[in-house]
Image (cartoon, rainbow, N blue to C red):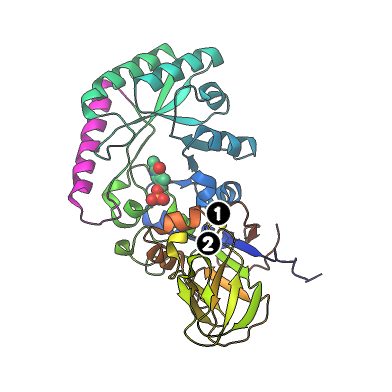
Amino acid sequence: MTQTPPQPSRARAEIDLNALRANVRALRARAPKSALMAVVKSDGYGHGALPCARAAIEAGATWVGTATPQEALALRSAGIGGRIMCWLWTPGDPWREAIEADLDVSVSGMWALAEVTAAARDAGRPARIHLKADTGLGRNGCQPADWPELVAASLAAEAAGTVRIAGLWSHLACADEPGHPSVTAQLETFRRMIGYAEGEGVRPEVRHLANSPATLTLPEAHFDLVRTGIAMYGVSPAPEVGTSAALGLRPVMTFSASVALVKHVPAGHGVSYGHRFVTDRETTLGLVPVGYGDGVPRHASGRGPVLVGGAWRRAAGRIAMDQFVVDLGGEKLQEGAEAVLFGPGDRGEPTAEDWAEAADTIAYEIVTRIGARVPRVYRGVHDTGGAGTDTGGDE
Ligand SMILES: *Cc1c(COP(=O)(O)O)cnc(C)c1O
C-alpha cells in the first residue's frame, strides 16, 4: 500500500505543487491589495499548465494568464473556471471561441478591435477586452500617439454592446534590473494613459502592469492585479533581484536522470562529438541519458553542472541530442544512480539559475525548454493546505 509508484527510468521532471502553492501565497503577501494572475503560458513554463493553474487557484490566484488563445481555450476546456486572460493575438485567431469560452482578451490595436467586435456580433454577446498600452517596452501594445483612437473606438464598441472594457494594462521592459530609469518612465506613462482613458469614460475593472520582478520589488507597480510567472515556479527572475531563498520562494521543478552506463577508460580518451574533452588520466565516465532533445542546452557543453554520486560534475565535452557524459574521476558508481541536473538545491544539487549561467541565458529558458520527452511527475496534487508533508506520486 505504501509502495511508491515506479519512477520513469530514464529521466523525469518532478513538479512540487505544494511548493507552487506556497510561492503563490508568498507572492500574494507581497501584493496584498492586488489580485494575482497565475501566468501559465508555454505549458506553465515547462511545469504543466493545467496542474499548475489548478494549484495556483487553490492557493488564491483569481486569474490565469496565457500568451495564446489556444492555450487559454485548452485550460477552459479542461475545466479551469474563473478569469482566464490571453494576450498574444494574430489576425484570424479564434475570437468567437474565446468570447464563447468567457475569456478575457487583449487588444493592442485597431485590427484586433475590428476582429473582436465582429466576433462578438456573431456570438451575440460582448467580449471582455483589456486595452494594452505600449508604455515603453516597444513590443506589443498601443503607442501613446495611437491611444486616443483606440480608446474612442473601444468606447464606441462598448456603447454598441460588442465589448466591455475590463482592463487597462501594460508590460515592463526592465523590471528585473531594479533602479533602471525605464521603470519609472513606464510607470509614469502608464498612469498618464490610464488617466486619459478614464477621463474619456473608460471604467476598467482592473489596471495591471507588474510581472514577477515588479511584484517582488516595486509596490507602486502593483495596481489592481499582478501577473506572476517565473516567481510562482520558485525561480528568481534575475540574479540582481535575489536568490529564490532570499525572495522566500521554492523552486518547483527538479530535473533528474538515471545514469545509463559507468565505465573505465584510459588516459587520453576523447569524449563525445568533436572530442572537446579528452581524459587527462585513467578515469571513469558516467553517461547521463538526456540531451538537447530534452531541453538540456548544448551551449552549456563543458560547463553544465550535475549532481552525481554526491558531487557536482560538469558535462564533459559536447552535450548531444539525447545524452552527455560526466567524468566521475575513477569513482565506480552503479548504473541507475541518480543524476540531478537542477532542483531546489537542498540536496546540494545545482539550480536552474546555475544552468542559466552555464548556458549564458536566463533561468526562464532553462525550465521552459525541458521537453515533452521528459515525463512530469507531480507531487502534492491534493492540496494539504500549507506546508504539510506529502507522500507524493499521487498523479
Ligand atoms: C510572461 C508574462 C508575464 C509573467 O512574467 P514573469 O516575469 O514570468 O512573471 C506577465 N505579463 C506578460 C504580458 C507576460 O508575457
Where is residue 382 shown, x and y percent of the image? 66, 57
Residue indicated by mark 2: 252
The residue beneath circle 1 is 47
Relative placement, left or right, of 52 versus 244 is right
Query: As shown in the figure, which amino acid type bears the numbered disc 2?
Result: Val
As drawn, the label of residue 348 is none
Residue at point 47%, 60% (across, down)? 298
Compared with residue 199, is residue 260 higher up or lower down, i.e. above or below?
below
**Answer yes or no: do the residues labelled 2 and 1 have beta carbons within 8 Å?**
yes
Residue lying furthest right: 1
- As drawn, 154 above or below 344: above
| Residue type of the residue flagged with mark 1 | His
Q: Is residue 98 visible?
A: yes
Q: Magenta span covers which residues?
A: 174-202
x, y (%) of residue 27?
42, 56
Please name whichever residue, 213 or 304, is drawn nearer the observer in this view of the structure: 304
- Label 1: which secondary element: loop
Residue 162 visible from this viewpoint = no
Q: Is residue 236 above or below residue 223?
A: below
Residue 134: x %, y % from top left: 28, 34
